[in-house]
Amino acid sequence: MGVVFGPRDVLKGRKWMMKKAARDLTSGQREAVEQILQRWEDEKSPKKIADLLGEERAKRLLKDLGIY
């Protein structure tokens, strides 16, 4: 079983996770995703990321980050 990190944990000392997961994002998208992760709300934030990146890319990003 894998370890699941919270969204804020990704930004605390785990920048390498974000860099690896967001390798195919533009710098603007990366910044927007980081802001969403900093202000994480369980119901709204995944939808905001999906609206920004598209459903498939959002699922892949959240999976790579270990959030979902």
Image (spheres, grey):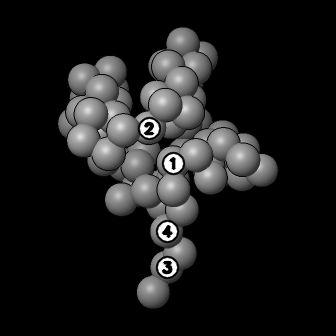
Q: Tell me the residue that label 2 is attached to.
A: 40
Disc 4 to disc 2, how far (Cα)?
15 Å
Q: Tell me the residue that label 1 is attached to.
A: 7
Q: Tell me the residue that label 4 is attached to.
A: 4
Residue 51 lies, with reference to residue 60, above or below; the image says: above
Kind of element beneath mark 1: helix
Please report whichever mark, 2 or 1, sits nearer to the chain's N-terminal start: 1
Disc 1 to disc 4, how far (Cα)?
10 Å
Q: In the rendered structure, which amino acid carries the disc numbered 1?
A: Pro
Is residue 52 visible in the rendered image? The answer is yes
Q: In the rendered structure, which amino acid carries the disc numbered 2?
A: Trp
Q: Position of residue 33 (x, y in %)?
A: 49, 28
Kind of element beneath mark 3: loop
**From the image, which quarter does the C terminus lie in?**
bottom left
Residue 56 lies, with reference to residue 53, above or below; the image says: below
Please report whichever mark, 4 or 2, sits nearer to the chain's N-terminal start: 4
Q: Which mark is residue 57?
A: none
Q: In the rendered structure, which amino acid carries the disc numbered 3?
A: Gly
Q: Residue at x 53, y 75 (%)?
A: 3
Q: Tell me the residue that label 3 is attached to.
A: 2
**Outermost top residue:** 28
Proximity of marks 2 and 1: CB atoms separated by less than 8 Å: yes
**From the image, which quarter does the N terminus lie in?**
bottom left
Proximity of marks 3 and 4: CB atoms separated by less than 8 Å: yes
